[in-house]
Amino acid sequence: MSLVYIALGGGLGAVSRFLLTGYLNNISDHFPFGTLSVNVLGCFVIGCVVGYFASKSSPMYLFFVIGFLGSFTTMSAFSIQTIELFNSNSISGIFYVILTFSFTIVATYIGLTFFLND
C-alpha cells in the first residue's frame, strides 16, 4: 500500500511542478522563477509536513514527502536531510552541502558535454 501513496503523490507533484513552473517562467525569459518558486515552496512544505508527521511510515508522510514533494522538487529532500545532519551536531551537513552542489553541477556538465560533442 505504501507504493500506492507514493505513486499518487508523485503523479500529483510532477503535474503541479509542470503547471506552476510553466506559469511562473513566463514572468522572465532570463531567470527561472518557476524553478526557484517550486524549490522554495517545496522546502517550506516539507518542513511543515515533517514537523507534523513525525512518523516516516505514516501514509500522509509517504504521500506528501516521498511522493508529492519528491517529484515536485528535489530541493525539499536535500534541505530536510541537511537540517537532520546539522541537528545531529555533525559536520556531515557541511560536507553534504558541498558534495551535493559540487558533484551535481559537475555531473550535469559532464552529461551535457558528453552528448553535445557528438
Image (tube, rainbow, N blue to C red):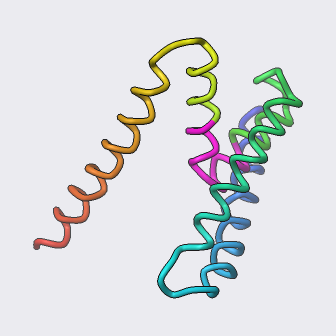
- Hey, which residue is sitting farthest left in the picture? 118
Q: Residue at x 76, y 59 (%)?
A: 12
- Closer to the camera, 32 or 73? 32
> Is 114 situated left or right of 82 in this image?
left
29 to 53, vertically: above or below: below
> Is 44 situated left or right of 105 in this image?
right
Where is residue 68? Give x, y as percent: 73, 50
Residue 111 figure quarter:
bottom left
Q: Residue at x 64, y 46 (%)?
A: 70
Q: Residue at x 89, y 30 (%)?
A: 52
Residue 14 figure quarter:
bottom right
Q: Residue at x 25, y 58 (%)?
A: 109
118 to 68, vertically: above or below: below
Give the main secondary structure of the magenta stretch: helix
Q: Is residue 76 magenta?
A: yes
48 to 105, vertically: above or below: above
Of the 4 image quadrants, the one containing the N terminus is: top right
Q: Is residue 105 magenta?
A: no
- Hey, which residue is sitting farthest right in the picture? 52
Where is residue 43? Give x, y as percent: 69, 47
How many numbered marks have been drawn onto this rendered protein structure? Answer: 0
Where is residue 74? Give x, y as percent: 57, 48
- Hey, which residue is sitting farthest top in the picture? 89
Find the magenta span and give its range. Answer: 67-79
Of the 4 image quadrants, the one containing the C terminus is: bottom left
